[in-house]
Image (cartoon, rainbow, N blue to C red):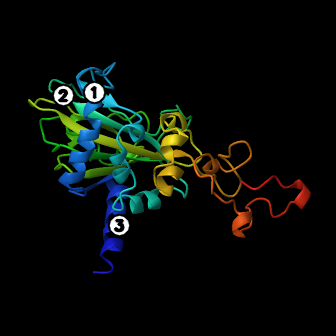
Amino acid sequence: MANAPARDLAQHLQRIEVDGFTILPKVIDTELITAIKHELSPFLQGQHPGRNDFEGLYSERVYALLSKAPSIAKIIEHPAVLPILDALLPPGFLLSAALAIDVHPGETPQPMHIDDNAGNLPFPRPRAHFGVSTIWALDDFTADNGATEVVAGSHRWPEERQAKEDEITQVVMPAGSVIVFLGTLLHRGGANRSASDRLAITPQYCMPGLRQIENMALAVPPSVAGQYSPRIQEMLGYATIDPGFMGYVDGVHPKRLIDPDYQGRRARGLESPGLASLTESQQFSNP
């Protein structure tokens, strides 16, 4: 079965190419789900409903998750999802947003939208995606409790095309599952006609050169970011883009803010990209 992971990855990427999304059923167990719910519980007390139809007037949202619920790091860098992200985004991609959405009974459908145009980028669809989103079900997503709804193939649609009701598909999946979809795919949160809440976590990722939707440097400050893995730290922005030093802080690598023992390229005997053509006197101190 050595080729099974590669075969599974190819199948997921094929589904994403055709439909714009793929679903990985029951990727995390109840133990992790319980831990995340416990950490989120203080922030889901019914005190802060959404402020508009998009956030959901009968929903609660929790932002800055890595500063509030550390177990969520396990899904942000989950080994079943990272290979898909690595195939769809360039090296050094960033965590653009990470939020919890608890949809309460009575919630209405969200407006249909895409995720990778928060900055009103002047590039109308159809176009290449700038980001990839994931939605993790911490409760079962059912036909009546507000399951996410997607429009298969809409990642290839022109900007002006609107989805018809018969083109919308509900993402019905058990707790512990995740849907991975392109930032250009039309989707929305569904209506909750049930008597119970529906909780989900949505980490979203973007190209390394784009501004993140959530200001991660403030949402997850150095004192908190230092507790996470190197991969999570890179996704938050504690990294530079090669070749060059986009992302530096005061002329040095941002990793120095959270790791006093961090060694730059020169200390590790590596050449600094972009500086090879400069003389020693022209080179900045290596980040």
Q: Are there few (<14), some (14-19), or many (20+) residues within 10 Å of tag 2?
A: many
Kind of residue indicated by mark 1: Glu
Kind of residue indicated by mark 3: Leu
x and y, in percent, of residue 43 in the image: 30, 29
Q: CA distance from mark 3 to mark 1?
A: 34 Å
73 left or right of 48?
A: right
Dots 1, 2 in contact, CB < 8 A: yes
Q: Residue at x 20, y 39 (%)?
A: 147
Dot label at residue 179: none
> Which residue is label 3 attached to?
9
> Which residue is label 2 attached to?
104
Of the image marks 3 and 2, the number of the one nearer the N terminus: 3
x and y, in percent, of residue 224 in the image: 48, 42
> Which residue is label 1 attached to?
60
Of the image marks 3 and 1, the number of the one nearer the N terminus: 3
Q: Are there few (<14), some (14-19), or many (20+) residues within 10 Å of tag 3?
A: some
The mark lying in front, picked from 3 and 1, is 1
Q: Quadrant of the N terminus?
A: bottom left
Mark 2: which secondary structure?
A: loop
Residue 101 shows in this picture: yes
| Foreground residue among 223 and 232 | 223
Q: Residue at x 72, y 42 (%)?
A: 250
